Image: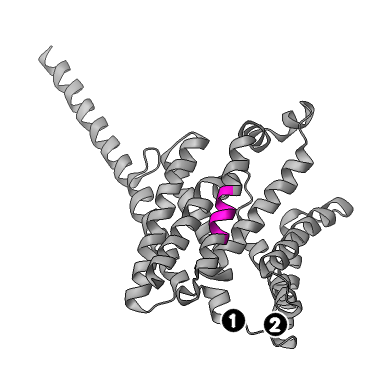
Amino acid sequence: MLCVYARCDRILVGILLCPVIGSFLILQRMTLLGDVIAHYVLPGLSVAAFTGINVLIGAFCSGLAGALFITWIRAQSRIKADSAMAITFSTFFALGIMLLSLLKNQFDLDGLLFGDILGVTSTDITYTLIVTLLLLTTVRLVYKELLLYTFDPTRAKVMGLPINILYIGLMAAITLTVIVSVRAVGVILVISMLVGPALTAYLLVKELHQMMIVGAELGASVSAVGVYCSYYTGVPSGPAIVLASSTLFVLVVLLLSPSQGILTRLNGRKQSLITLINLSSGRHKH
């Protein structure tokens, strides 16, 4: 039963992360924001556990507050996004660790940081399924608006689209994704799973919807492989899933990518050489 819970949870996480959030993060060049928000949720987790409220609510509020805090810093000063993320990232992470210690919460810190296959429950499956359906439905309903906002935010603003609402919605989606992913791969490794399969799909296909579909398949696959490796070898689930994703990226994308793969380029050069030889042979005959 434990293995079934773990497999379902990781596959749902893979389907959720790869086609939706990971794709938009990559196309908007915001990939590091996922890692930053993963550390933003720590204070909320600790406070929620201490006060007795649902930890998902606490984590969501803390993560979204951190993301909006970055926006506020950029609006009120000349500080760039990367600098704002750097200072707030370390601050929220330090605050979260301090609160975990001071409030004496019964959190498994290793599991929180690196993922814990033994911590998967039917409740986790339910929460993950709800978040998955919520995000997939929302993206389906506002897909055209998100597409325009992602590739041309200036035009989206001129056309009257509520870009501020779209931005806040995207921050909320990232936060929800991180929350349900922490149990799978942990806070430290969540960024790899967040963008790894989607980045693989990005180099294999050209359209956004194709990127989501292929990313979903790759994400579910590496999640399942990572869970089985973790369960049967006794290694933490987070590193196992991340290594499966990274291995897929290196072996498949860098070698077989239609536009950038090493083997593809070598095959292209071989075909060019054969063509050149044939042309030279044809000239000698004439």
| Residue 37 spot, x, y in % from top left | 67, 62
* Residue pictured at 14% horizontal, 22% vertical: 281
Q: Is residue 130 magenta?
A: yes
Residue 270 coordinates in the image, percent (x, y): 24, 36
Give the vertical position of 273 relative to 18 (above or below): above
Mark 1: which amino acid? Answer: Leu
Identify the element where label 1 is drawn. helix
- Point 75% across, 76% down: residue: 47
Is residue 237 shown to the viewer in this render?
Answer: yes
The residue carrying pointer 2 sits among few (fewer than 14), some (14 to 19) or many (20 or more) residues within 10 Å by Cα, namely many
Q: Where does the image place residue 90, in percent across and percent down from the top left?
A: 71, 71
Q: Secondary structure at mark 2?
A: helix
Residue at image coords 73%, 28%? 155
CB-based contact (under 8 Å), mark 2 and mark 1: yes
Which range of residues does the magenta coloring cover?
A: 127-133
Please name the residue that numbered disc 1 is placed on: 109
Secondary structure that dominates the magenta span: helix
Q: Is residue 246 in sight in this rendering?
A: no
Tell me the quadrant of the picture where the C terminus can be found. Answer: top left
* In-front residue for pair 140/29: 140
Q: Residue at x 44, y 57 (%)?
A: 11
User: On the rendered structure, is 280 left or right of 130?
Assistant: left
Label placed on residue 100: 2
